[in-house]
């Protein structure tokens, strides 16, 4: 009889210990899931340390399960995207918009600096989730990836102050040397212009291509090029920063939308980002970001 009571007592103690362990384990799980601040660039979003918070608009999007929106960008195209001088802090229109989109989705943005000429291939190789890199939407590019329009810009021409070559458009670049960033829409425009010039028996444009736009601008600064051709906001910014040595013609040739690039199979992500962008437009944050960069004229509706 005493043995049986002793056995029952041992069993009760063991049961209490097991229940206590279960409660301790539950408490540990709650601690690990606590949301922690995280952010990149000018805006910070809140995400769980171990993934996307429950109830977040991104919770059902496979690419965002880790709580991070990875953004591929060639960060050398001010004022759209660039590194703050002397730092590795990304700045610019695309950076602010990407951070705002991430915040709307309940995740944080992380930027992957990638050369423009290989950025579509890198996206399709899943090196990041989306691309935002002042990329003009074209039929050719749309065959490779999907786009979400978010801004509009045309092509402008950067020349020496006073416009000594009297350039008024691409056709006036005949016989001149022009700097341009590789893989941009402007390369295609110059190619088309040369075909027309050749057909008309006129001197072609001597095209110098560079990995990054600042390298092309340097050629103009040093007199090795007569002009630089790039997106209108970039040309305006280069002129503004030149201490009066360079001038933007103020053109908007073949204005077209910039697009957020998404892999064709990332259908849920495309819907989520599209909805987030529309929310930013509706609540006014989109307009505020454009105004901060003096780019209101490129707003989409």
Image (cartoon, rainbow, N blue to C red):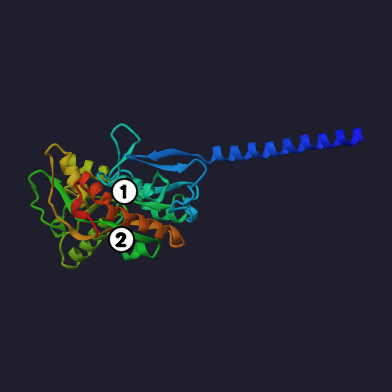
Q: What SS does tag 2 mark?
A: loop
Asked if residue 63 is positioned above or below residue 15 in the image, the reply reads below
Q: Is residue 159 left or right of residue 185?
A: left
Q: Distance between the residues labelled 2 and 1?
A: 18 Å
Residue located at (42% from left, 46% from top): 107
Residue located at (45% from left, 60% from top): 268
Asked if residue 20 is positioned above or below residue 59 in the image, the reply reads above
Q: Where is residue 278 in the image (x, y as percent from the top left)?
A: 31, 57
Q: Where is residue 193 in the image (x, y as percent from the top left)?
A: 20, 62
Q: Is residue 174 left or right of residue 34?
A: left
- Closer to us: 77 or 171: 77
Neighbor class of circle 1 (other Cα within 10 Å; few <14, some 14-19, many 20+) is: many
Q: Where is residue 258 in the image (x, y as percent from the top left)?
A: 29, 56
- Closer to us: 210 or 272: 272
**The N terminus lies in quadrant:** top right
| Quadrant of the rendered image containing residue 162 | top left
Q: What SS does tag 1 mark?
A: helix
Residue located at (40% from left, 51% from top): 105
Q: Nearer the viewer, mark 2 or mark 1?
A: 1
Q: Earlier in the sequence, mark 2 or mark 1?
A: 1
Q: Which mark is residue 137?
A: 2
**The C terminus lies in quadrant:** bottom left
Total marks in image: 2
Neighbor class of circle 2 (other Cα within 10 Å; few <14, some 14-19, many 20+) is: many
Residue 225 visible from this viewpoint: no
Asked if residue 28 is positioned above or below residue 146 in the image, the reply reads above
Residue matched to label 1: 97
């Amino acid at each position: 009889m005493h043995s049986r009571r002793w056995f029952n007592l041992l069993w009760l103690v063991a049961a209490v210990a097991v229940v206590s362990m279960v409660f301790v384990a539950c408490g540990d799980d709650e601690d690990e899931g606590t949301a922690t601040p995280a952010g990149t660039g000018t805006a910070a979003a809140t995400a769980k340390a171990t993934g996307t918070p429950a109830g977040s608009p991104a919770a059902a999007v496979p690419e965002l399960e880790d709580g991070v929106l990875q953004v591929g960008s060639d960060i050398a195209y001010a004022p759209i995207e660039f590194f703050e001088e002397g730092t590795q802090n990304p700045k610019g229109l695309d950076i602010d918009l990407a951070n705002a989109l991430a915040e709307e989705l309940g995740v944080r943005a992380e930027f992957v600096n990638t050369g423009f000429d290989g950025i579509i291939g890198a996206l399709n190789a899943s090196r990041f989730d989306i691309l935002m890199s002042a990329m003009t939407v074209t039929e050719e590019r749309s065959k490779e990836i999907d786009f979400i329009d978010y801004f509009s810009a045309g092509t402008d021409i950067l020349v020496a102050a006073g416009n000594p070559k009297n350039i008024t458009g691409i056709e006036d670049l005949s016989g001149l040397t022009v700097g341009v960033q590789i893989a941009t829409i402007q390369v295609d425009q110059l190619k088309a212009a040369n075909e027309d010039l050749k057909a008309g028996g006129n001197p072609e444009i001597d095209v110098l291509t560079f990995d990054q736009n600042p390298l092309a601008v340097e050629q103009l600064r040093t007199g090795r090029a007569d002009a630089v051709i790039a997106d209108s906001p970039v040309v305006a910014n280069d002129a503004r920063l030149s201490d009066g040595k360079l001038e933007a013609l103020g053109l908007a040739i073949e204005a077209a939308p910039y697009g957020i690039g998404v892999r064709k199979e990332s259908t849920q992500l495309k819907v989520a980002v599209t909805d987030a962008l529309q929310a930013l437009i509706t609540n006014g944050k989109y307009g505020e970001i454009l105004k901060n960069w003096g780019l209101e004229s490129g707003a989409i509706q």
